[in-house]
Image (tube, grey):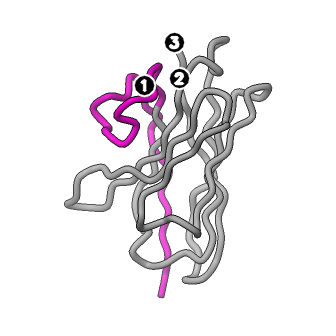
């Protein structure tokens, strides 16, 4: 199993950038598909991006495509989310999740392990 821990959140002005990190404990990190989700107050958790075991495949929500990039370093047991051209509507708590199978990568209920989240606030 893995235990994700997110970091890198903060306050940034619109148009700025942030890089989130998710470090996962456990020796089987490379066996897990990793995903980033976000949840704004009063809203459901929504898919942001996911990356395959080796990092060769990545998928994005339409709302972040072209602005966000997901990547992973299996040697460091870490997955990243580079967020550029941030907008106020990107404000949310960002969560990192892990699952073993690639199917339904955008469905939060299919993820087995979650981190505690990191707050991202984008001011206008």
65 to 47, vertically: above or below: below
Q: How many angstroms separate mark 1 from mark 2 (CA)?
A: 6 Å
Part of the protein shown in magenta: 98-124
Specify which label sits upstream in the sequence, 1 or 2: 2
In-image side of 121 versus 72 (left or right): left
Tag on residue 19?
none
Badge 3 vs badge 1, beta-carbon distance below 8 Å: yes
Q: How many angstroms separate mark 3 from mark 1 (CA)?
A: 8 Å
Q: How many angstroms separate mark 3 from mark 2 (CA)?
A: 7 Å
Q: Report the residue marked by disc 3.
A: 1
Q: Residue at x 26, y 61 (%)?
A: 41
Local crowd at mark 1 within 10 Å, few (<14), some, or many (≥20)? some
| Magenta span includes 120 | yes
27 to 83, vertically: above or below: above
Badge 3 vs badge 2, beta-carbon distance below 8 Å: yes
Q: Residue at x 45, y 44 (%)?
A: 95
81 to 111, vertically: above or below: below
Specify which label sits upstream in the sequence, 3 or 1: 3
Percent x, y of residue 45: 30, 49
Q: Residue at x 49, y 82 (%)?
A: 123
Badge 1 vs badge 2, beta-carbon distance below 8 Å: yes
Q: Nearer the viewer, mark 3 or mark 2?
A: 3
Q: Report the residue marked by disc 1.
A: 113
Q: Secondary structure at mark 1?
A: strand
Percent x, y of residue 105: 40, 37
Please give the count of numbered marks on the rendered protein.
3
> Foreground: 30 or 54?
54
In-image side of 107 versus 17 (left or right): left
Q: Secondary structure at mark 2?
A: strand
Q: Residue at x 51, y 65 (%)?
A: 65
Tag on residue 3?
2
Local crowd at mark 2 within 10 Å, few (<14), some, or many (≥20)? some
């Amino acid at each position: 199993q893995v235990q994700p821990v997110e970091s890198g959140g903060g306050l940034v002005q619109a148009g700025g950038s942030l890089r989130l990190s998710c470090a996962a404990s456990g020796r089987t990190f490379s066996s897990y598909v990793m995903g980033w989700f976000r949840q704004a107050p009063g809203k459901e958790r929504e898919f942001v991006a996911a990356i395959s075991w080796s990092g060769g495949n990545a998928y994005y929500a339409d709302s972040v495509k072209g602005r966000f990039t997901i990547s992973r370093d299996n040697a460091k047991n870490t997955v990243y989310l580079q967020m550029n051209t941030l907008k106020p509507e990107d404000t949310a708590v960002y969560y990192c999740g892990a699952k073993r199978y690639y199917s339904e990568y955008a469905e939060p209920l299919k993820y087995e392990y979650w981190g505690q989240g990191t707050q991202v606030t984008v001011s206008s």
